[in-house]
Image (cartoon, rainbow, N blue to C red):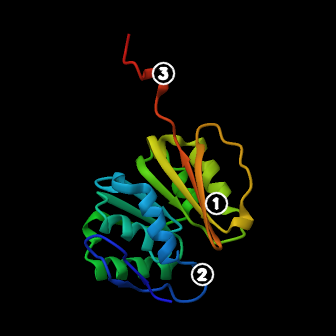
């Protein structure tokens, strides 16, 4: 089943699939629901697409006006497909594509923060949980009030002990669960300096 860009500057463009069975592209209706939930906050934002696969989620973010998207995947064919899809959509100028292990990326010191991080690893390996914990342990990856979205099969869902991130919503679309976490803003400084 082909995947396409749903809205924005590249609306209707068909995206290439990664050859083989290594990725699981998000269905159009799930992607549409995701961006309806994120709303206009996506415009001008920074977005990290972890385990990016085809790049379809990050490309949708760019098409809808995200300022900058970093795509991270360790698979050579996925990286090639992301570059091809960025060329098809003419969105490469606001994108950075990194071929690296997602967990190595999350352990980098002094990370670049994002407003949104999308975590959609291969199913049934528990990597979503490891990635979520890695972000929680190094929350500098996320701006205060930033959002992490985890895409998993509902059967994979289990509670995770987190110190910083707080779950605030979850939606199920057939065999896909979108689980939303937020890094709460700096409440100690909310009133300004004394």
Q: CA distance from mark 3 to mark 2?
A: 44 Å
For label 3, count other residues whose C-alpha is less than 10 Å away and answer few (under 14), some (14-19) or many (20+). Answer: few
Q: CA distance from mark 1 to mark 3?
A: 30 Å
Please provide percent x and percent y for residue 1: 51, 89
For label 2, count other residues whose C-alpha is less than 10 Å away and answer few (under 14), some (14-19) or many (20+). Answer: few
Secondary structure state at the residue bearing disc 3: helix
Q: Residue at x 41, y 67 (%)?
A: 58
User: Which numbered disc, 3 or 2, marks the residue that appears first in the sequence?
Assistant: 2
> Which image quarter: residue 7?
bottom left
Please provide percent x and percent y for residue 48: 44, 58
Q: Mark 3 sits on what residue?
A: 188
Which is more toward the observer, 83 or 170? 170
Q: Is residue 136 above or below residue 81?
A: above
Quadrant of the image containing the C terminus? top left
For label 1, count other residues whose C-alpha is less than 10 Å away and answer few (under 14), some (14-19) or many (20+). Answer: many
| Numbered tag placed on residue 128 in the rendering | 1
Please report contact status of discs 1 and 2: CB closer than 8 Å, yes or no.
no
Please report contact status of discs 3 and 2: CB closer than 8 Å, yes or no.
no
Q: Mark 2 sits on what residue?
A: 22
Q: CA distance from mark 1 to mark 2?
A: 16 Å
Which is more toward the observer, 52 or 177? 177
């Amino acid at each position: 089943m082909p995947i396409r860009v749903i809205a924005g500057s590249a609306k209707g463009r068909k995206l290439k699939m990664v050859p083989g069975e290594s990725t699981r592209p998000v269905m159009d209706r799930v992607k549409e629901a995701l961006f309806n939930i994120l709303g206009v906050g996506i415009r001008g934002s920074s977005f990290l697409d972890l385990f990016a696969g085809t790049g379809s989620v990050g490309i949708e973010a760019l098409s809808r006006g995200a300022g900058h998207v970093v795509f991270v995947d360790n698979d050579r064919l996925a990286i090639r497909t992301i570059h091809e899809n960025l060329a098809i959509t003419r969105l490469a100028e606001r994108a950075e594509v990194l071929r690296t292990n997602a967990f190595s990326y999350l352990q980098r010191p002094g990370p670049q923060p994002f407003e949104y991080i999308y975590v959609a690893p291969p199913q049934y390996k528990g990597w979503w949980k490891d990635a979520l914990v890695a972000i929680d342990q190094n929350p500098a990856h996320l701006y205060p009030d930033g959002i992490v979205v985890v895409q998993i099969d509902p059967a994979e869902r289990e509670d995770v002990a987190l110190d910083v991130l707080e779950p605030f919503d979850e939606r199920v679309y057939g065999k896909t669960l979108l689980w939303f976490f937020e890094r709460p803003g700096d409440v100690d400084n909310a009133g300004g300096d004394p």
